[in-house]
Amino acid sequence: MKRTIPTIAALALLAGGAAAAQDGAACEALHNAPIASGFVTSSRVVDATEDLPAYCEVRAVALPAINIEVRLPMEGWNGRYYQAGCGGFCGILGRADASGGWVNAMRPGLQRGYATATSDSGHHGLSVLDGGWAYNNPHAERDWGYRSIGETHRVAQSMITRFYGDVSEQAVFQGCSTGGRMAHVAALRYPEMFDGIISGAPAMDYTGLVATNASWVIQANTDENGEMILKPGRDKLVGDVVMAQCDAVDGAEDGLIADPRQCEVDLAQAQCSGEAGEDCLTAEEIEVVEKWRQGPVNSAGESLYPGALMPGSEPFWWLWVIGNEKGQGGLTPGFATDFGRYMAFDEDPGVNWTPTDFDFDRDPGRMGASSAMYNGDNPDISGFRAAGGKMIVWHGWSDAIVPPMKTVEWHEQAAEVAGGEEALAENVALFMIPGMDHCGIVPGAGGISQASIDPMTALETWMNDGARPASIMAAE
Protein backbone atom coordinates (compact mmCIF):
# COMPACT_ATOMS: atom_id res chain seq x y z
CA MET A 1 0.00 0.00 0.00
CA LYS A 2 3.03 2.29 0.36
CA ARG A 3 2.80 5.00 -2.25
CA THR A 4 5.68 6.22 -4.41
CA ILE A 5 7.28 9.33 -2.91
CA PRO A 6 6.12 12.34 -4.93
CA THR A 7 8.75 13.79 -7.24
CA ILE A 8 8.50 17.34 -5.85
CA ALA A 9 8.46 16.17 -2.25
CA ALA A 10 11.41 13.84 -2.87
CA LEU A 11 13.52 16.59 -4.44
CA ALA A 12 12.69 18.92 -1.56
CA LEU A 13 13.61 16.28 1.00
CA LEU A 14 16.96 15.76 -0.73
CA ALA A 15 17.54 19.49 -0.91
CA GLY A 16 16.73 20.51 2.61
CA GLY A 17 14.54 18.10 4.54
CA ALA A 18 11.19 19.74 3.84
CA ALA A 19 8.90 20.47 0.90
CA ALA A 20 9.40 23.79 -0.83
CA ALA A 21 7.41 26.74 0.49
CA GLN A 22 4.31 27.79 -1.43
CA ASP A 23 3.16 31.36 -1.92
CA GLY A 24 -0.21 32.95 -1.27
CA ALA A 25 -1.03 33.17 -4.97
CA ALA A 26 -0.80 29.39 -5.30
CA CYS A 27 -3.28 29.06 -2.45
CA GLU A 28 -5.70 31.61 -3.87
CA ALA A 29 -5.54 29.89 -7.27
CA LEU A 30 -7.10 26.78 -5.74
CA HIS A 31 -10.39 28.70 -5.52
CA ASN A 32 -10.77 28.15 -9.25
CA ALA A 33 -9.55 24.56 -9.28
CA PRO A 34 -12.05 22.22 -10.99
CA ILE A 35 -13.17 19.10 -9.10
CA ALA A 36 -15.16 16.27 -10.64
CA SER A 37 -18.60 16.10 -8.97
CA GLY A 38 -17.83 19.05 -6.75
CA PHE A 39 -16.47 22.56 -6.49
CA VAL A 40 -14.21 24.75 -4.36
CA THR A 41 -15.98 27.44 -2.37
CA SER A 42 -13.00 29.32 -0.91
CA SER A 43 -9.24 29.29 -0.42
CA ARG A 44 -7.12 31.50 1.79
CA VAL A 45 -3.85 31.58 3.68
CA VAL A 46 -4.17 31.22 7.46
CA ASP A 47 -1.23 32.71 9.34
CA ALA A 48 0.89 30.66 11.70
CA THR A 49 -0.05 30.56 15.38
CA GLU A 50 1.83 29.53 18.47
CA ASP A 51 1.14 25.83 17.84
CA LEU A 52 0.24 25.61 14.14
CA PRO A 53 2.17 26.49 10.98
CA ALA A 54 0.77 28.75 8.28
CA TYR A 55 -1.47 26.82 5.93
CA CYS A 56 -3.67 27.15 2.88
CA GLU A 57 -7.28 26.54 3.93
CA VAL A 58 -9.46 25.19 1.15
CA ARG A 59 -13.21 24.74 1.56
CA ALA A 60 -14.96 22.55 -1.01
CA VAL A 61 -18.18 20.61 -1.61
CA ALA A 62 -18.35 17.07 -2.95
CA LEU A 63 -21.81 16.62 -4.42
CA PRO A 64 -24.45 16.44 -3.30
CA ALA A 65 -23.63 18.10 0.04
CA ILE A 66 -20.37 16.93 1.64
CA ASN A 67 -18.58 20.02 2.99
CA ILE A 68 -14.83 19.47 3.19
CA GLU A 69 -11.96 21.45 4.64
CA VAL A 70 -8.39 20.83 3.49
CA ARG A 71 -5.38 22.39 5.23
CA LEU A 72 -2.13 22.48 3.25
CA PRO A 73 1.08 23.58 5.02
CA MET A 74 2.59 26.61 3.30
CA GLU A 75 6.04 25.20 3.97
CA GLY A 76 7.56 22.06 5.44
CA TRP A 77 4.99 19.63 3.97
CA ASN A 78 6.18 16.14 4.85
CA GLY A 79 4.76 14.55 1.70
CA ARG A 80 1.97 12.79 3.61
CA TYR A 81 -1.76 13.09 4.24
CA TYR A 82 -3.81 13.00 7.48
CA GLN A 83 -7.63 12.74 7.52
CA ALA A 84 -9.79 13.24 10.61
CA GLY A 85 -13.24 11.85 11.38
CA CYS A 86 -16.05 13.64 13.21
CA GLY A 87 -18.13 13.05 16.34
CA GLY A 88 -21.80 12.35 17.07
CA PHE A 89 -23.97 12.87 14.01
CA CYS A 90 -21.31 15.33 12.73
CA GLY A 91 -22.78 18.19 10.67
CA ILE A 92 -20.42 20.93 11.90
CA LEU A 93 -17.32 21.33 9.74
CA GLY A 94 -14.09 21.52 11.71
CA ARG A 95 -15.82 21.33 15.09
CA ALA A 96 -13.06 19.25 16.67
CA ASP A 97 -10.38 21.79 15.74
CA ALA A 98 -12.25 24.47 17.67
CA SER A 99 -12.34 22.38 20.85
CA GLY A 100 -8.64 22.43 21.71
CA GLY A 101 -8.24 18.65 21.87
CA TRP A 102 -6.66 16.36 19.29
CA VAL A 103 -9.46 13.77 18.92
CA ASN A 104 -11.20 14.04 15.52
CA ALA A 105 -9.11 17.15 14.85
CA MET A 106 -6.78 18.01 11.96
CA ARG A 107 -4.36 19.65 14.39
CA PRO A 108 -2.14 16.59 15.14
CA GLY A 109 -1.41 16.06 11.46
CA LEU A 110 -0.86 19.73 10.64
CA GLN A 111 1.54 20.14 13.56
CA ARG A 112 3.66 17.33 12.09
CA GLY A 113 3.70 18.71 8.56
CA TYR A 114 0.90 16.64 7.04
CA ALA A 115 -1.62 17.95 4.56
CA THR A 116 -4.89 17.42 6.44
CA ALA A 117 -8.63 17.27 5.80
CA THR A 118 -11.99 16.57 7.39
CA SER A 119 -15.69 16.90 6.49
CA ASP A 120 -19.11 17.48 7.99
CA SER A 121 -20.02 13.98 6.67
CA GLY A 122 -22.57 15.30 4.18
CA HIS A 123 -25.04 17.55 6.01
CA HIS A 124 -25.41 20.60 8.21
CA GLY A 125 -26.66 20.08 11.76
CA LEU A 126 -27.54 22.52 14.49
CA SER A 127 -25.55 20.31 16.86
CA VAL A 128 -23.92 16.89 16.79
CA LEU A 129 -27.15 15.53 18.34
CA ASP A 130 -29.27 16.84 15.46
CA GLY A 131 -30.48 13.95 13.28
CA GLY A 132 -33.32 15.72 11.47
CA TRP A 133 -31.28 15.93 8.25
CA ALA A 134 -31.68 12.16 7.79
CA TYR A 135 -35.50 12.09 7.83
CA ASN A 136 -36.53 10.11 4.71
CA ASN A 137 -33.17 11.02 3.19
CA PRO A 138 -31.24 7.84 2.27
CA HIS A 139 -28.70 9.76 0.19
CA ALA A 140 -27.63 11.84 3.20
CA GLU A 141 -27.54 8.70 5.33
CA ARG A 142 -25.29 7.03 2.76
CA ASP A 143 -22.91 10.00 2.80
CA TRP A 144 -22.80 10.01 6.61
CA GLY A 145 -22.41 6.25 6.70
CA TYR A 146 -19.43 5.83 4.41
CA ARG A 147 -19.26 7.93 1.26
CA SER A 148 -17.93 11.09 2.93
CA ILE A 149 -14.79 9.17 3.92
CA GLY A 150 -13.82 8.42 0.34
CA GLU A 151 -14.97 11.78 -1.02
CA THR A 152 -12.94 13.73 1.53
CA HIS A 153 -9.88 11.74 0.54
CA ARG A 154 -10.56 12.30 -3.17
CA VAL A 155 -11.02 16.07 -2.90
CA ALA A 156 -8.03 16.45 -0.56
CA GLN A 157 -5.77 14.54 -2.92
CA SER A 158 -6.89 16.77 -5.79
CA MET A 159 -5.93 19.87 -3.79
CA ILE A 160 -2.62 18.32 -2.71
CA THR A 161 -1.71 17.50 -6.29
CA ARG A 162 -2.50 21.01 -7.52
CA PHE A 163 -0.73 22.73 -4.63
CA TYR A 164 2.40 20.59 -4.32
CA GLY A 165 2.58 18.90 -7.71
CA ASP A 166 1.95 15.26 -6.76
CA VAL A 167 -0.08 12.96 -4.54
CA SER A 168 0.87 12.18 -0.94
CA GLU A 169 3.23 9.32 -0.27
CA GLN A 170 1.29 8.05 2.76
CA ALA A 171 -2.20 8.46 4.24
CA VAL A 172 -3.45 8.25 7.83
CA PHE A 173 -7.00 8.32 9.25
CA GLN A 174 -7.78 9.29 12.85
CA GLY A 175 -11.15 9.31 14.56
CA CYS A 176 -12.92 8.62 17.85
CA SER A 177 -16.54 7.64 18.65
CA THR A 178 -18.37 8.20 15.35
CA GLY A 179 -14.91 8.98 14.02
CA GLY A 180 -13.86 5.55 15.31
CA ARG A 181 -16.79 4.02 13.45
CA MET A 182 -15.54 5.84 10.35
CA ALA A 183 -12.07 4.42 10.94
CA HIS A 184 -13.42 0.85 10.89
CA VAL A 185 -15.59 1.61 7.86
CA ALA A 186 -12.49 2.95 6.10
CA ALA A 187 -10.63 -0.31 6.75
CA LEU A 188 -13.56 -2.30 5.33
CA ARG A 189 -14.77 -0.19 2.40
CA TYR A 190 -11.52 1.53 1.42
CA PRO A 191 -8.88 -1.05 2.45
CA GLU A 192 -6.06 0.44 0.32
CA MET A 193 -6.82 4.12 0.97
CA PHE A 194 -5.05 4.53 4.32
CA ASP A 195 -1.65 3.17 5.34
CA GLY A 196 -2.43 3.78 8.99
CA ILE A 197 -5.65 4.09 11.01
CA ILE A 198 -6.23 5.28 14.57
CA SER A 199 -9.62 4.23 15.93
CA GLY A 200 -10.68 5.50 19.35
CA ALA A 201 -13.75 4.31 21.30
CA PRO A 202 -15.30 3.13 18.02
CA ALA A 203 -19.09 3.26 17.77
CA MET A 204 -18.70 0.57 15.13
CA ASP A 205 -22.16 -1.03 15.52
CA TYR A 206 -24.16 2.18 15.45
CA THR A 207 -27.59 0.58 15.25
CA GLY A 208 -26.82 -1.79 18.12
CA LEU A 209 -25.34 1.01 20.19
CA VAL A 210 -27.44 4.13 19.61
CA ALA A 211 -30.78 2.40 19.02
CA THR A 212 -30.81 -0.91 20.92
CA ASN A 213 -28.36 -0.29 23.75
CA ALA A 214 -29.19 3.36 24.38
CA SER A 215 -32.90 2.56 24.47
CA TRP A 216 -32.17 -0.19 26.99
CA VAL A 217 -30.23 2.23 29.20
CA ILE A 218 -33.06 4.75 29.08
CA GLN A 219 -35.90 2.28 29.61
CA ALA A 220 -34.08 0.63 32.52
CA ASN A 221 -34.00 3.99 34.30
CA THR A 222 -37.57 5.09 33.54
CA ASP A 223 -40.42 4.35 35.94
CA GLU A 224 -44.09 3.90 35.08
CA ASN A 225 -44.64 7.65 35.32
CA GLY A 226 -41.85 8.42 32.88
CA GLU A 227 -39.53 9.67 35.63
CA MET A 228 -35.89 8.74 36.18
CA ILE A 229 -35.29 6.13 38.87
CA LEU A 230 -31.55 6.64 39.43
CA LYS A 231 -31.37 10.42 39.54
CA PRO A 232 -28.46 12.86 39.22
CA GLY A 233 -26.17 12.71 42.22
CA ARG A 234 -26.90 9.07 43.04
CA ASP A 235 -24.12 7.95 40.69
CA LYS A 236 -21.50 9.02 43.25
CA LEU A 237 -22.87 6.60 45.84
CA VAL A 238 -22.72 3.76 43.31
CA GLY A 239 -19.19 4.77 42.32
CA ASP A 240 -18.01 4.86 45.93
CA VAL A 241 -19.25 1.31 46.51
CA VAL A 242 -17.64 0.12 43.29
CA MET A 243 -14.27 1.67 44.07
CA ALA A 244 -14.29 0.26 47.59
CA GLN A 245 -14.81 -3.23 46.21
CA CYS A 246 -12.71 -3.04 43.03
CA ASP A 247 -9.83 -0.61 43.44
CA ALA A 248 -7.45 -3.07 45.10
CA VAL A 249 -8.31 -6.06 42.90
CA ASP A 250 -5.39 -5.23 40.59
CA GLY A 251 -3.01 -4.95 43.54
CA ALA A 252 -2.86 -1.17 43.73
CA GLU A 253 -5.22 1.25 45.49
CA ASP A 254 -4.84 4.12 43.04
CA GLY A 255 -8.40 5.06 42.08
CA LEU A 256 -8.12 3.04 38.87
CA ILE A 257 -9.60 -0.34 38.02
CA ALA A 258 -7.08 -1.95 35.68
CA ASP A 259 -9.55 -4.46 34.23
CA PRO A 260 -13.17 -4.12 35.40
CA ARG A 261 -13.92 -7.65 34.21
CA GLN A 262 -11.95 -8.89 37.21
CA CYS A 263 -14.37 -7.42 39.77
CA GLU A 264 -17.89 -8.60 40.57
CA VAL A 265 -19.67 -5.69 42.24
CA ASP A 266 -22.22 -6.40 44.99
CA LEU A 267 -24.43 -3.39 45.66
CA ALA A 268 -26.49 -5.24 48.27
CA GLN A 269 -24.32 -3.85 51.06
CA ALA A 270 -25.44 -0.35 50.05
CA GLN A 271 -29.17 -1.19 49.90
CA CYS A 272 -31.45 0.71 52.22
CA SER A 273 -32.73 -1.47 55.06
CA GLY A 274 -35.65 0.82 55.70
CA GLU A 275 -36.63 4.14 54.24
CA ALA A 276 -34.64 5.55 51.35
CA GLY A 277 -31.81 7.86 52.33
CA GLU A 278 -28.86 9.75 50.88
CA ASP A 279 -26.35 7.12 52.03
CA CYS A 280 -28.10 4.02 50.65
CA LEU A 281 -29.60 2.72 47.42
CA THR A 282 -33.17 1.57 46.96
CA ALA A 283 -33.95 -1.82 45.45
CA GLU A 284 -35.24 -0.02 42.37
CA GLU A 285 -31.99 1.92 41.95
CA ILE A 286 -29.94 -1.24 42.31
CA GLU A 287 -32.09 -2.92 39.67
CA VAL A 288 -31.32 -0.08 37.26
CA VAL A 289 -27.57 -0.53 37.76
CA GLU A 290 -27.85 -4.30 37.36
CA LYS A 291 -29.64 -3.86 34.03
CA TRP A 292 -26.95 -1.43 32.90
CA ARG A 293 -24.29 -3.97 33.87
CA GLN A 294 -26.13 -6.66 31.90
CA GLY A 295 -26.78 -4.87 28.63
CA PRO A 296 -29.85 -5.25 26.38
CA VAL A 297 -31.64 -8.58 25.95
CA ASN A 298 -34.86 -9.65 24.27
CA SER A 299 -37.75 -11.47 25.93
CA ALA A 300 -35.93 -14.78 25.44
CA GLY A 301 -32.94 -13.47 27.38
CA GLU A 302 -30.69 -13.31 24.31
CA SER A 303 -28.01 -10.64 24.36
CA LEU A 304 -28.57 -7.96 21.71
CA TYR A 305 -25.43 -5.90 22.26
CA PRO A 306 -22.43 -6.16 24.63
CA GLY A 307 -23.38 -2.87 26.23
CA ALA A 308 -22.51 -3.33 29.88
CA LEU A 309 -21.60 -0.14 31.72
CA MET A 310 -18.38 -1.30 33.35
CA PRO A 311 -17.39 -0.83 36.99
CA GLY A 312 -15.38 2.37 37.15
CA SER A 313 -17.52 4.24 34.61
CA GLU A 314 -19.68 5.85 37.33
CA PRO A 315 -17.75 9.19 37.46
CA PHE A 316 -18.90 9.80 33.87
CA TRP A 317 -22.54 8.76 34.17
CA TRP A 318 -23.50 12.41 34.73
CA LEU A 319 -22.24 13.40 31.28
CA TRP A 320 -23.57 10.49 29.29
CA VAL A 321 -26.42 8.78 31.13
CA ILE A 322 -28.25 10.73 33.83
CA GLY A 323 -27.01 14.33 33.90
CA ASN A 324 -26.06 16.24 37.02
CA GLU A 325 -27.93 18.35 39.53
CA LYS A 326 -27.17 21.50 37.50
CA GLY A 327 -29.04 20.13 34.49
CA GLN A 328 -25.87 19.43 32.54
CA GLY A 329 -24.94 16.28 30.62
CA GLY A 330 -27.16 13.24 30.17
CA LEU A 331 -26.50 13.15 26.41
CA THR A 332 -27.52 9.54 25.69
CA PRO A 333 -31.28 10.31 25.43
CA GLY A 334 -30.58 13.08 22.93
CA PHE A 335 -28.57 10.79 20.66
CA ALA A 336 -31.02 7.91 21.00
CA THR A 337 -34.07 10.06 20.30
CA ASP A 338 -32.95 11.64 17.04
CA PHE A 339 -31.29 8.44 15.87
CA GLY A 340 -34.51 6.48 16.36
CA ARG A 341 -36.72 9.17 14.84
CA TYR A 342 -34.72 9.84 11.69
CA MET A 343 -31.78 7.48 11.15
CA ALA A 344 -32.18 3.98 12.55
CA PHE A 345 -35.18 2.29 11.00
CA ASP A 346 -35.94 1.18 7.46
CA GLU A 347 -39.01 3.44 7.73
CA ASP A 348 -38.41 6.58 9.79
CA PRO A 349 -41.07 6.89 12.53
CA GLY A 350 -40.59 10.65 12.84
CA VAL A 351 -40.89 13.21 15.58
CA ASN A 352 -43.30 11.36 17.89
CA TRP A 353 -40.97 8.38 18.48
CA THR A 354 -39.06 8.12 21.77
CA PRO A 355 -36.55 5.55 23.09
CA THR A 356 -39.23 4.18 25.41
CA ASP A 357 -41.03 2.96 22.26
CA PHE A 358 -38.16 0.65 21.31
CA ASP A 359 -39.22 -3.02 21.21
CA PHE A 360 -36.33 -5.37 21.96
CA ASP A 361 -38.00 -8.29 20.20
CA ARG A 362 -39.14 -6.53 17.05
CA ASP A 363 -37.02 -3.45 16.46
CA PRO A 364 -33.48 -4.89 16.09
CA GLY A 365 -34.70 -6.55 12.89
CA ARG A 366 -36.09 -3.30 11.48
CA MET A 367 -32.70 -1.64 10.97
CA GLY A 368 -31.25 -3.66 8.10
CA ALA A 369 -30.71 -0.80 5.65
CA SER A 370 -29.09 1.51 8.17
CA SER A 371 -26.90 -1.28 9.55
CA ALA A 372 -25.57 -1.92 6.05
CA MET A 373 -24.82 1.78 5.52
CA TYR A 374 -23.45 2.72 8.95
CA ASN A 375 -21.81 -0.18 10.70
CA GLY A 376 -18.14 -1.06 10.67
CA ASP A 377 -18.06 -4.01 13.07
CA ASN A 378 -17.31 -6.71 10.50
CA PRO A 379 -14.17 -8.37 11.94
CA ASP A 380 -12.91 -9.44 8.51
CA ILE A 381 -10.43 -6.70 7.62
CA SER A 382 -8.40 -9.01 5.40
CA GLY A 383 -8.29 -6.45 2.57
CA PHE A 384 -6.71 -3.84 4.85
CA ARG A 385 -4.30 -6.40 6.27
CA ALA A 386 -3.33 -7.64 2.80
CA ALA A 387 -2.54 -4.06 1.80
CA GLY A 388 -0.12 -3.81 4.73
CA GLY A 389 -2.16 -1.35 6.75
CA LYS A 390 -1.49 -0.70 10.44
CA MET A 391 -4.34 0.00 12.85
CA ILE A 392 -4.27 1.22 16.44
CA VAL A 393 -7.53 0.79 18.35
CA TRP A 394 -7.91 2.37 21.77
CA HIS A 395 -10.83 2.49 24.21
CA GLY A 396 -11.33 3.64 27.79
CA TRP A 397 -12.56 1.01 30.22
CA SER A 398 -14.71 3.70 31.89
CA ASP A 399 -16.53 4.75 28.71
CA ALA A 400 -20.21 5.15 29.62
CA ILE A 401 -21.71 5.91 26.19
CA VAL A 402 -19.78 3.52 23.91
CA PRO A 403 -19.33 0.55 26.27
CA PRO A 404 -15.90 -1.00 25.74
CA MET A 405 -16.82 -4.68 25.52
CA LYS A 406 -17.92 -4.29 21.89
CA THR A 407 -14.35 -3.31 21.02
CA VAL A 408 -12.97 -6.27 22.99
CA GLU A 409 -15.43 -8.58 21.22
CA TRP A 410 -14.50 -7.19 17.79
CA HIS A 411 -10.80 -7.70 18.47
CA GLU A 412 -11.37 -11.31 19.53
CA GLN A 413 -13.43 -11.99 16.41
CA ALA A 414 -10.91 -10.24 14.16
CA ALA A 415 -8.15 -12.44 15.61
CA GLU A 416 -10.20 -15.54 14.87
CA VAL A 417 -10.77 -14.45 11.27
CA ALA A 418 -7.08 -13.59 10.85
CA GLY A 419 -5.99 -17.00 12.08
CA GLY A 420 -5.01 -16.08 15.60
CA GLU A 421 -3.94 -13.14 17.75
CA GLU A 422 -0.35 -13.36 16.53
CA ALA A 423 -1.44 -12.97 12.91
CA LEU A 424 -3.76 -10.06 13.71
CA ALA A 425 -1.02 -8.36 15.73
CA GLU A 426 0.94 -7.81 12.53
CA ASN A 427 -1.64 -5.17 11.60
CA VAL A 428 -3.78 -4.33 14.64
CA ALA A 429 -2.84 -3.19 18.15
CA LEU A 430 -5.54 -2.80 20.82
CA PHE A 431 -5.10 -0.64 23.93
CA MET A 432 -7.72 -0.67 26.71
CA ILE A 433 -7.13 2.26 29.05
CA PRO A 434 -8.17 2.10 32.74
CA GLY A 435 -10.15 5.04 34.11
CA MET A 436 -10.58 6.81 30.76
CA ASP A 437 -13.84 8.49 29.76
CA HIS A 438 -15.31 8.32 26.26
CA CYS A 439 -12.59 9.62 23.90
CA GLY A 440 -10.85 10.97 27.01
CA ILE A 441 -13.17 13.98 27.04
CA VAL A 442 -13.52 14.39 30.82
CA PRO A 443 -10.37 13.76 32.90
CA GLY A 444 -10.61 10.66 35.06
CA ALA A 445 -8.66 9.44 38.07
CA GLY A 446 -5.15 10.83 38.11
CA GLY A 447 -6.15 13.26 35.36
CA ILE A 448 -6.15 10.66 32.61
CA SER A 449 -7.67 12.03 29.40
CA GLN A 450 -7.01 12.25 25.67
CA ALA A 451 -3.98 14.39 26.53
CA SER A 452 -2.48 11.35 28.28
CA ILE A 453 -2.07 9.32 25.10
CA ASP A 454 -0.21 9.77 21.81
CA PRO A 455 -1.27 7.12 19.30
CA MET A 456 0.05 9.19 16.37
CA THR A 457 3.71 8.83 17.35
CA ALA A 458 3.16 5.12 17.92
CA LEU A 459 1.50 4.71 14.53
CA GLU A 460 4.19 6.64 12.67
CA THR A 461 6.90 4.49 14.24
CA TRP A 462 5.02 1.33 13.35
CA MET A 463 4.38 2.34 9.73
CA ASN A 464 7.81 3.77 9.01
CA ASP A 465 10.17 1.73 11.21
CA GLY A 466 8.20 -1.49 11.60
CA ALA A 467 8.19 -1.35 15.41
CA ARG A 468 4.79 -2.46 16.72
CA PRO A 469 3.74 -0.22 19.63
CA ALA A 470 3.75 -1.61 23.14
CA SER A 471 2.06 1.53 24.50
CA ILE A 472 0.34 4.68 23.31
CA MET A 473 0.82 6.66 26.51
CA ALA A 474 2.25 10.13 25.90
CA ALA A 475 5.85 10.74 26.91
CA GLU A 476 6.13 12.84 30.05
Image (cartoon, rainbow, N blue to C red):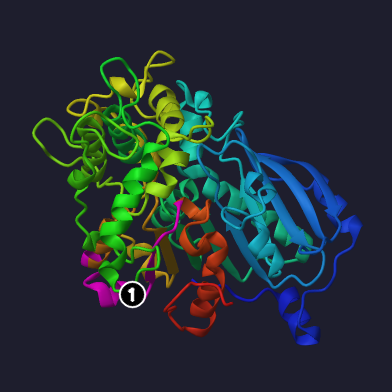
Q: Is residue 66 above or below residue 390?
A: above
The kind of residue on which mark 1 rests is: Ala
Circle 1 is placed at which residue position?
425
- Where disc 1 sits, the SS reads loop
**Residue 81 in the image: x percent, y percent?**
63, 64
Residue at (47%, 83%) from the top-left corner?
466
Question: Where does the magenta region start and end?
Answer: 416-437
Between 124 and 194, which is closer to the camera in this rendering?
124
Q: Considering depth in this image, is 5 or 377 the residue closer to the camera? A: 377
Quadrant in which residue 474 is drawn: bottom right
The answer to whether one can see residue 316 in this image is: yes
Q: Quadrant of residue 92?
A: top right
Nearer to me, 427 or 25? 427
Q: Is residue 113 magenta?
A: no
Looking at the image, which residue is at 57% across and 63% down? Answer: 451
Q: Residues within 10 Å of mark 1 (few under 14, many from 20)?
A: some
State the image coordinates of residue 202 (x, y, percent, origin top left). Answer: 41, 52
Furthest residue in direction front, as rendered: 274
Q: Position of residue 263 (x, y in %)?
A: 22, 60
